[in-house]
Amino acid sequence: MSDPTIKGILFSESSLDGSSLRIAIVHARWNKPVIDVLLQGAISKLKAVGVKENNIVVQSVPGSYELPIAVSKVITGSRVQAGATATDLLGGLNFGSPLPSRTTTPAPNSASTTTNPPPTVVTTTSSQPFDAVIAIGVLIKGETMHFEYISDTVSHGLMRVQLDTGVPVVFGVLTALTENQALVRAGIGKGQNKGHNHGEDWGLAAVEMAVSSRRWS
Ligand code: DLZ
């Protein structure tokens, strides 16, 4: 037995139907090898319960500290621009028509038509607002107080975003005291205990919360 504890969420995957949902995943790039495994775990479970691949949008940010603002923008952007073509707004995938500040309407007789590179257009079949967002980060304690400040700020920030927007934000941020603690929570521990990929739980939590939110509202 790899994990003899009683910890964990009891999910009934067969009762979850994500086929009508649109889910965003925003992840940090710090500790990327662990992030990648968690991300794949989340995506695999989203698909397993019926979320369509083109309704899963993945956006990255530099570090966990950037997660709350990015998740907030992703949610509000998808609401404002629902119905428009998916476009690059944040430097990666995004969710609506081009930002006015990134395109310039040519002045009459002007030779210059744009001051910025045109946004990258990413085609999705869906333009509905996001039903839930999964925020993924991996914080590993170092020698200074950085870890404590970022962990605290990010967890409060993400909670605030979900309460302010009413869109469930799944807390996929590992706050590990050692590197191996993070690896174990991605199912790739170094020792005998490989652990379990928590990304899978986050995928299922996102679908459950998205479906429940629709029912509750
Ligand atoms: C600076 C920093 C440090 C020391 N450690 C981590 C970490 O373990 N995990 C993580 O996601 N991000 C870390 N960062 C980066 C900050 O989250 C943030 O990106 C920078 O401070 C820039 O705002």
Image (cartoon, rainbow, N blue to C red):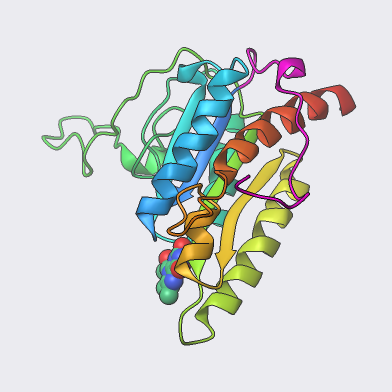
Residue sitting farthest toward the left: 111
* Quarter where residue 169 is shown: top right
In the rendering, at what x and y percent does residue 194 appear?
50, 50
- Viewer-closest of 153 and 42: 42
Residue 198 placement (x, y as % from top left): 59, 45
Magenta segment: does it hold 122? no
Residue 206 picture location, percent across and down: 67, 34
Report x, y in % for residue 28: 44, 54
Is residue 27 toward the left or the right of residue 79 in the image? left
Can the viewer see residue 82?
no
Q: Horizontally, is 53 left or right of 165 in the view?
A: left
Note whether 22 is above or below 68 in the view shown: above
Q: Nearer the viewer, residue 161 or 84?
A: 161
Residue visible at 11% across and 34% down? 111
Quadrant occupied by the C terminus: top right
Question: Where does ligand 1 appear, by image quarter?
Answer: bottom left
Q: Which residue extends farthest bottom?
A: 144
Q: What range is drawn magenta here?
A: 1-21
The answer to whether 206 is drawn above or below residue 156 in the figure is above
Which one is in front, 149 or 178?
Answer: 178
